[in-house]
Image (cartoon, rainbow, N blue to C red):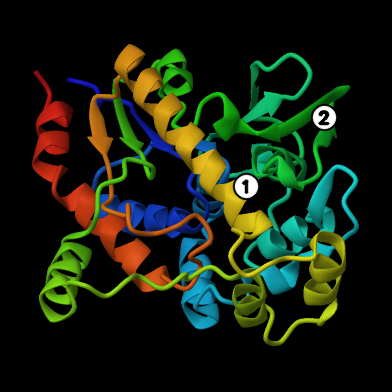
């Protein structure tokens, strides 16, 4: 009797684009593609842990209800020391509202999370102990969230060294590695049509600046305390024409991630590479939940036949 091939799923980093992982997993399940273990980075780790705890449906319902806009109301603003946002308690809240699972060992399938050692600059793989601590580390975006101390090391977002950690999945002896890369820059067909239509209607119209800091933060924090707006204003004396600090940090990290991902995937390519068309989404576009989930689903469905062919016993 031929044994089934072991499938490793890799969920890459991508901030607001991370909801695409929900659609990607739903497509795999719909096609009855088995998932034996998951390797995640940043938001990919968050989705992976909730899926492995049996709580993906709860996460999807939550982000669709919230429509992403109030995500930041779950984080407290602090005066900068090592990070602008305090996510220590809030990451636990955002995870525990969906599941009671707290330890890696209690997940229904193995999950590994990638973080970066802030001192040495090397990749750190977390797969045992506290899930919340590992999530805080792998999602600790430099400049926005404070580093997390784990086993004597200060850890930050794994995307600094390995946004789509295919190598970790291969090291775990996966027969087939399916990787979901959220930073390819590919633009959705919907957006291509929209841009074409806009060009026809107003060829000479200059694009508006979408990300004026006070306007954006006002939208995100419509039901949160007004302290964020006040503190940011006092700290940075923002002028309208200057890109805001959050957009600057996230855009810079996105540029870095895209280039690192390209190099890493060339060195260690997965068997199946899924690249949802999310290039038009900036890293903080948390109000595009439906679009992100849909593109994740479509991205996997486009490769389903290839995946099934690889899983067919020889």
Using the image, tell me which numbered label, if any, was put on residue 238: none
169 or 85, which is in the foreground? 85
Q: Is residue 195 left or right of residue 45?
A: left
> Where is residue 189 drawn, in percent x and y?
16, 61
Task: Name the image quarter holding residue 266.
Answer: top left
Task: Name the image quarter holding residue 76.
Answer: bottom right
Which is in the foreground here, disc 1 or disc 2? 1
| Number of marks in the rendered image | 2
Disc 1: which residue: 249
- Point out the image quarter for the N terminus: top left
Task: Kindly tell me whether residue 113 is visible in this rendering.
Answer: no
* Sequence order check, earlier mark of 1 and 2: 2
> Where is residue 110 drawn, in percent x and y?
53, 34
Q: Residue at x 81, y 47 (%)?
A: 83
Residue 183's place in the image compared with 153, above or below, is: below
Q: Is residue 61 left or right of residue 292?
A: right
Spot the residue most to the front: 204
Q: Is residue 200 left or right of residue 215?
A: left
- Point out the image quarter for the C terminus: top left
- Secondary structure category for the residue under label 1: helix
């Amino acid at each position: 009797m031929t044994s089934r091939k072991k499938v490793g799923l890799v969920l890459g980093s991508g901030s607001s684009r991370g909801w695409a992982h929900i659609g990607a997993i739903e497509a795999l399940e719909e096609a009855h593609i088995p998932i034996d273990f998951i390797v995640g980075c940043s938001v990919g780790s968050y989705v992976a842990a909730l899926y492995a705890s049996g709580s993906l449906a709860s996460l999807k319902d939550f982000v669709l209800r919230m429509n992403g806009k109030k995500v930041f109301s779950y984080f407290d603003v602090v005066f900068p020391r090592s990070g602008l946002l305090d996510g220590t308690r809030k990451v636990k809240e955002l995870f525990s509202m969906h599941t009671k699972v707290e330890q890696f060992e209690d997940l229904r399938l193995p999950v590994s999370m990638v973080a970066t050692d802030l001192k040495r600059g090397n990749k750190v793989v977390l797969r045992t102990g506290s899930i919340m601590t590992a999530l805080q580390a792998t999602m600790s975006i430099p400049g926005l969230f404070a580093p997390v101390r784990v086993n004597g090391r200060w850890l930050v977002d794994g995307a600094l060294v390995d946004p789509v950690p295919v190598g970790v999945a291969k090291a775990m002896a996966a027969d087939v590695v399916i990787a979901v890369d959220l930073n390819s820059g590919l633009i959705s067909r919907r957006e291509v049509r929209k841009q074409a239509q806009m060009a026809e209607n107003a060829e000479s119209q200059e694009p508006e600046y979408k990300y004026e800091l006070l306007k954006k933060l006002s939208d995100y924090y419509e039901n949160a305390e007004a302290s964020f707006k006040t503190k940011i204003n006092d700290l940075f004396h923002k002028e309208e024409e200057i890109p805001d600090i959050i957009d600057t940090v996230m855009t810079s990290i996105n540029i870095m991630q895209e280039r690192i991902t390209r190099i890493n995937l060339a060195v260690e390519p997965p068997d199946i590479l899924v690249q949802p068309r999310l290039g038009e989404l900036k890293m903080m576009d948390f109000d595009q939940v439906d679009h992100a989930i849909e593109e994740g689903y479509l991205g996997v469905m486009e490769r389903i036949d290839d995946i099934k062919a690889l899983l067919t016993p020889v």
